[in-house]
Image (cartoon, grey):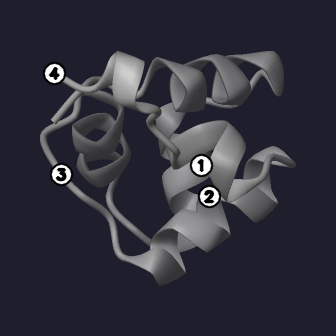
Amino acid sequence: MARNLRMRAARAAKDMTQKELADRLGVARQTINAIENGDYNPSIKLCLGICRALDRTLDQLFWEDEENEE
């Protein structure tokens, strides 16, 4: 799994820490860290929550085009 730099950038743009995002979503900070590092594949429910919290769409944060796949 690739690192999710788009999610990290969107979170930083909102001046939100991993802990703040995690608290808002009801998950552990380690979960957010694992998603950003590409170590955890979140459920669609969690993806949607992240998108709402960061004011982004699923495509903007989680869609990988064929050129970016490893």
- What residue is at 12 percent from the left and 40 percent from the top? 39
Q: Amino acid at mark 2?
A: Ile
Between discs 2 and 1, the one toward the N terminus:
1
Pointer 4: what residue? 70
Q: Within 10 angstroms of label 2, few (less than 14), some, or many (20 or more) residues?
A: many
Q: Amino acid at mark 4?
A: Glu
Q: Within 10 angstroms of label 4, few (less than 14), some, or many (20 or more) residues?
A: few
Pointer 1: what residue? 21
**What numbered label is drawn on residue 40?**
3
Quadrant for residue 43, please give it: bottom left
Position of residue 45 relative to residue 8, above or below, is below
Q: Nearer the viewer, mark 2 or mark 4?
A: 4
Label 2 vs label 4: CA separation? 23 Å
- What residue is at 63 percent from the left and 17 percent from the top? 9
Near-viewer residue (2 or 32): 2
- What residue is at 22 percent from the left and 41 percent from the top? 34
Quadrant in which the N terminus is drawn:
top left
Between discs 4 and 3, the one toward the N terminus:
3
Pointer 2: what residue? 50
Quadrant in which the C terminus is drawn:
top left
Q: Amino acid at mark 3?
A: Tyr
Q: Nearer the viewer, mark 2 or mark 1?
A: 2
Between discs 2 and 4, the one toward the N terminus:
2
Position of residue 19 relative to residue 10, above or below, is below
Q: Can residue 24 be seen at all in this image of the molecule?
A: no
Q: Are marks 2 and 1 in contact (CB under 8 Å)?
A: yes
Between discs 3 and 1, the one toward the N terminus:
1
Between discs 1 and 4, the one toward the N terminus:
1
Q: Within 10 angstroms of label 1, few (less than 14), some, or many (20 or more) residues?
A: some
Residue 13 image point, x, y percent: 80, 18
Residue 16 image point, x, y percent: 70, 30
